[in-house]
Amino acid sequence: MRIAFYAPLKPPNHTTPSGDRRVARLLIEALERAGHAVELASCFRSYDPDAARQAALREEGVALARRLASEWRAQPRASRPELWFTYHVYYKSPDWLGPSVSAELGIPYVIAEASHAPKRAGGPWAIGHDAAVEAIRRADLLLCPTRHDVTGLRSLVPGSERILMLSPFLDAAPFRAAAAARAGHRARLAAARGLDPAVPWIVVAAMMRPGDKLASYRALGEALAHLEDLPWRLVVAGDGAARAEVESVLEAAVPGRACFLGELGPRELAAAYAACDLCAWPAVNEAYGMAMLEAQAAGLPVVSCALRGVPDVVAAGRSGLLAPPADAGALAQLVRSLLVDPELRSSMGHAAADFACGERGLGAAADLLRHALERVAAGAAAA
């Protein structure tokens, strides 16, 4: 099937790395592995942190949708898209293109990761909120990465036939390869950064920016401060506008314990995960946290908090441990339990790799997408 792919929050070819860009690329890869031909429909960003820009973005989006539909209608049917696939719709990044273009072309409309925020109705983000609601109601299929998202969509989409769970997934190959070379990665990192390979290393990989990411770093520092009686080091991969503040926060909380690697490329990041012993991240207000899934694919158990979509990327009690939200003491106790028990770390690490590389692997996602889109296409043909 020919698929027009669109990501209104951040296109997959955006120059700034982020979890959103990574997931968009993974979706394209999974769709292609499922046998579809994927075309990037547009790089138009409907996202803007300034609510006052919503009306202007709507006008721009509506005009672009008309132009795209007109251009495709002028092409032979065999060259037109057969399905429109939008990734990540919410009140700050509504889809001004997909609903109207798919209606004009008479093709199915699919959304992966849509969020409904009723509290935004009638407020400063009303334009984006209403557009997101319209797109959600219009969609022939809604693919939800978390149970939290499913619950939020129930009020807009009664019944379950148009809602399907597509749990967060990844291409596990580079992380499996890094895990197989763990000893070498650990030795090189120890030599380069003066780390003692005889003590456990806790890894965290996250952008350093104000807001929820900085809040997570603060919460991590608060939790790790409870563990100063144990030997361990913190390995931090990431960079961003708040780097100075992040470094200050962690140095104040756990003096001399943190090693900052900066922003890493995909191979270097996989090697950093594999060199470490466990991953800890509070995930304050995160949708789910792709970095924690990557750490598991590299064979690390994860300690996080049971909020929003985290339980959909960490199999609690199997691939990691989840504390109650905003409970630094409980988070610290779970990290402690892994620091003092190498056998538990090892067994959970093996289970984490099985979980991330198997049921959260790219192949499993491609299979689910293949069957789901076949069903949608068949339903459209029969209508």
Image (tube, rainbow, N blue to C red):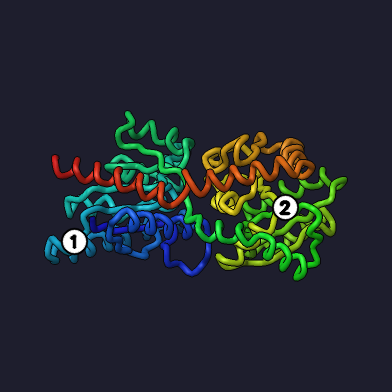
Residue at screen point 42% across, 40% down: 116
Q: Is residue 347 visible?
A: yes
Residue at which label 2 appears: 202
Question: Is 188 above or below relative to 105?
Answer: below
Q: Is residue 304 visible?
A: no
Find numbered disc 1 in the image and state the secondary structure of the residue it sits on.
loop
Judge by depth and name the residue closer to the eye, 265 or 182.
Answer: 182
Residue at which label 1 appears: 80
| Circles 2, 1 touching at the beta carbon (< 8 Å) | no
Left or right: where 356 falls relative to 70 = right
Residue at screen point 52% across, 40% down: 312
Q: Quadrant of residue 71?
A: bottom left
Query: Which label sits in the foreground, 2 or 1?
Result: 2
Find numbered disc 2 in the image and state the secondary structure of the residue it sits on.
strand
Give, as a three-letter code, the residue at label 1: Arg
Left or right: where 35 falls relative to 147 = left
- Outermost residue toward the top? 159
Q: Position of residue 60 (x, y in %)?
A: 32, 62
Precedes in sequence: disc 2 or disc 1: 1
Q: Position of residue 134 (x, y in %)?
A: 31, 43
Q: CA gap, disc 2 to disc 1?
A: 49 Å
Judge by depth and name the residue closer to the eye, 142 or 73.
Answer: 142
